[in-house]
Image: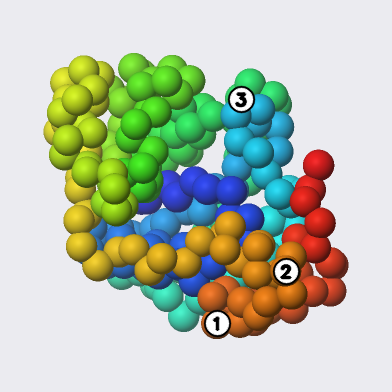
Amino acid sequence: MRIGIYGSSFDPITYSHLFTAATVAHRRRLDKVIFVPCSSKRHDKKLQTEDVHRLHMLKLALASSTHKTNKYGEPLFEISTVEMDGLPGETYTYDTMMHMKKKYPNDELFFIMGSDLLEGLSNWGNAEKLVAGFNFIVMSREGYPTADLIAEDALLRNHDEHFLIMSKGINMGISSTYIRDEIRKGGDPSFLLPDTCLQYIYEKGIYKEPYV
């Protein structure tokens, strides 16, 4: 199988995340997309919401996508809590991809990312092993020219065959930050994320105040 690993904070998950996963799966002929919510144990990523809430919203969102199946009749989308369950220092992308490689030893793995992340990729934990050992599906983002960013970085350009670029029809422009700000300021983010997720946010009072 061809499996996409989609890591993000999903804080909260949006229709843009779901559209991205479905589009990447279709255009790159993926048989499965695994959503991997990052852990609050990471010190390099500031989160707004506790793990338990982000995971629950992700489950609610994917519950509305059960009709999406692959050619084997299996669900196209699933969730892995490998990063949330990991110990501090074991919650980085390289660790996640090694976990997936052990779990799916005979399958092709692709890490799904936006071109905005290419700038700092060489500074990620175990970056050389990560870039040399795995393939990436890179979605172009405005202001972050994918080909140029790869060419300007020695590590990336020496492994440019590992980067599959998607340059059109992928960016819906809906961000988790925008949704959080709308909720915090009393706005209405309906139609930007699944209704079940929005209802859960209101019920739990999430995003009314910054999470510390």
- Which quadrant of the figure has residue 190? bottom right
Q: Position of residue 191 (x, y in %)?
A: 55, 82
Q: Amino acid at mark 1?
A: Phe
Q: Residue 100 appears at what percent x and percent y? A: 46, 38
* Separation of residues labelled 2 and 3 (CA atoms): 36 Å
Label 3 near label 2: C-beta < 8 Å? no
Which residue corresponds to mark 1? 191
Q: Nearer the viewer, mark 1 or mark 3?
A: 1
**How many numbered callouts?**
3
Q: Residue furthest right?
A: 204
Amino acid at the residue labelled 2:
Lys
Instruction: Give the mark nearer the N terminus: 2 vs 3.
Output: 3
Question: Pointer 2: what residue?
Answer: 185
Q: Percent position (x, y) of residue 30?
A: 30, 58
Residue name at image x 54 percent, y 29 percent: 92
The quarter holding residue 202 reads: bottom right
Q: Earlier in the sequence, mark 1 or mark 3?
A: 3
Q: Residues within 10 Å of mark 1 (few under 14, many from 20)?
A: few
Cα–Cα span, label 1 and label 3: 36 Å
Q: Residue at x 41, y 65 (%)?
A: 173
Asked which colour scheme the image uses, the reply is rainbow
Q: Residue at x 36, y 22 (%)?
A: 122
